[in-house]
Image (cartoon, rainbow, N blue to C red):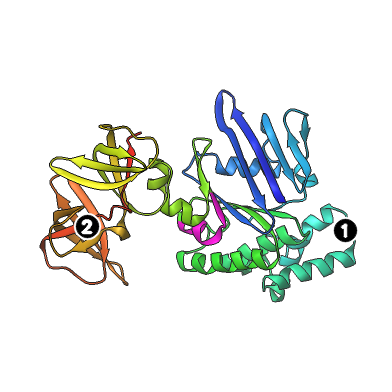
């Protein structure tokens, strides 16, 4: 049974449609990431679930309990929904100790003092900050503040936790550590989670499923593997991963296959989304899928190496041919001059230009 069900939720501000009919479900114990560019509607959708925004249509329910139903005039207040919410800013009270910050939602709900002490201690211990109970927010690191915000969301044991860019205020190294820790914690506690992020790597690392929003609509949803390896549109292909875009025309479109033709070159690939013969198209290929080849052959181009950047564990290389630029990776430096690049047919998506 799904813990959280969202059906055809629509929301507009004035004459502007922000959500145009979004549906998804979060299964028990599952983490679903809301991914998309700025303005796609992901934070608005999260706020609709929390009760901080009211849609004009659709339905939202948790474990069979209706939180919102536009057709029946049902719209529970945020405090009646029993959800845990972690904001991007953490929103900690600066004049309250860690203990008092975490205890605050329990006091609002009229929980007794003895029960508050036990539940706060349990929440703090579960995320490894029990020893910080008497400190104030300014005495904590960014990572510790993030844990306090999470403990506050967990203290009343909600069935679903909502996370709005929960790691965005952490530095890069700490973010990598925190996303591993956070996923493990949610799994260990048996929670369901809906997490907004703009970081595709964070979404793939943390989530069981990803819902990609584009202009208030669901562009595609699926497992991280499905989203990365089998995009359903040009937008999905280019949003996930680091990519090369090759302009041309579609040719040989049949049975899920297509070729990209530009100049006197032809590269075979996979048809991505609706595509017609002769249509203006792009070929999209991940940087890591472009291979160095030892000579001419199918799906290969001869290109000149123009620059290389040392990234620590590898080099990023930039090649040029006429107006076409292609980037890829290598484990060692390459000599200057021309090289052959191969574009594997199963890794080149041919999609209509939108």
Could you tell me residue 227's position as x and y percent?
46, 51
Q: Is residue 203 visible?
A: yes
Residue name at image x 52 percent, y 69 percent: 177
Q: Which segment did they paint magenta?
A: 201-210
On screen, residue 317 above or below 14:
below
Q: Is residue 89 visible?
A: no
Q: Is residue 229 left or right of residue 323?
A: right
User: Which secondary structure dominates the residues rendered in magenta?
Assistant: helix
Q: Quadrant of residue 191?
A: bottom right
Q: Mark 1 points at which residue?
A: 111
Residue 342 badge: 2
Could you tell me residue 243's position as x and y percent?
32, 51
Q: Quadrant of residue 21?
A: top right
Q: Which of 103 and 43 is in front in this view?
A: 43
Callouts 1 and 2 close, C-beta under 8 Å: no
Q: Is residue 237 left or right of residue 91?
A: left
Q: How many labels does the image show?
A: 2
CA neighbours of label 1 inside 10 A, class few (<14), some (14 to 19), many (20+): some
Disc 2, SS:
strand
- Is tag 1's residue or tag 2's residue first in the polypeptide sequence? 1
């Amino acid at each position: 049974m799904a813990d959280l069900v969202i059906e055809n939720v629509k929301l507009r501000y004035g004459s502007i449609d922000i959500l145009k009919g979004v549906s998804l479900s979060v299964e028990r114990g599952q983490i679903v990431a809301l991914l998309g560019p700025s303005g796609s509607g992901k934070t608005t959708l999260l706020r609709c679930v929390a009760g901080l925004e009211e849609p004009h249509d659709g339905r939202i329910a948790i474990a069979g309990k209706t939180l919102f139903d536009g057709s029946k005039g049902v719209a529970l207040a945020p405090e009646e929904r029993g959800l845990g919410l972690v904001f991007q800013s953490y929103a900690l009270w600066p004049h309250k100790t860690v203990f008092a910050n975490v205890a605050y939602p329990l006091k609002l709900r009229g929980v007794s003092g003895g029960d508050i002490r036990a539940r706060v201690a349990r929440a703090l211990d579960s995320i490894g900050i029990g020893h910080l109970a008497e400190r104030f927010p300014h005495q904590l690191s960014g990572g510790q503040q993030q844990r306090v915000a999470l403990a506050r969301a967990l203290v009343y044991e909600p069935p679903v936790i909502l996370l709005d860019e929960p790691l965005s205020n952490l530095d890069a190294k700490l973010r990598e550590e925190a996303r591993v820790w956070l996923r493990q914690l949610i799994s260990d506690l048996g929670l369901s989670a809906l997490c907004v992020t703009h970081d595709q790597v964070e979404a793939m690392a943390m989530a069981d499923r990803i819902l990609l929003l584009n202009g208030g609509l669901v562009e595609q949803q699926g497992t991280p593997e499905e989203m990365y390896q089998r995009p359903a549109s040009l937008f999905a292909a280019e949003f996930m991963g680091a990519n090369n875009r090759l302009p041309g025309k579609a040719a040989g479109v049949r049975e899920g296959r297509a070729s990209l033709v530009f100049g006197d070159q032809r590269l075979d690939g996979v048809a991505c989304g609706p595509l017609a013969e002769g249509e203006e198209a792009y070929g999209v290929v991940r940087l890591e899928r472009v291979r160095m080849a030892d000579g001419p052959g199918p799906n290969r181009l001869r290109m000149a190496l123009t620059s290389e950047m040392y990234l620590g564990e590898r080099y990023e290389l930039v090649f040029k041919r006429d107006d076409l630029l292609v980037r890829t990776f290598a484990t060692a430096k390459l000599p200057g001059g021309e090289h052959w690049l191969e574009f594997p047919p199963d890794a080149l998506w041919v999609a209509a230009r939108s």
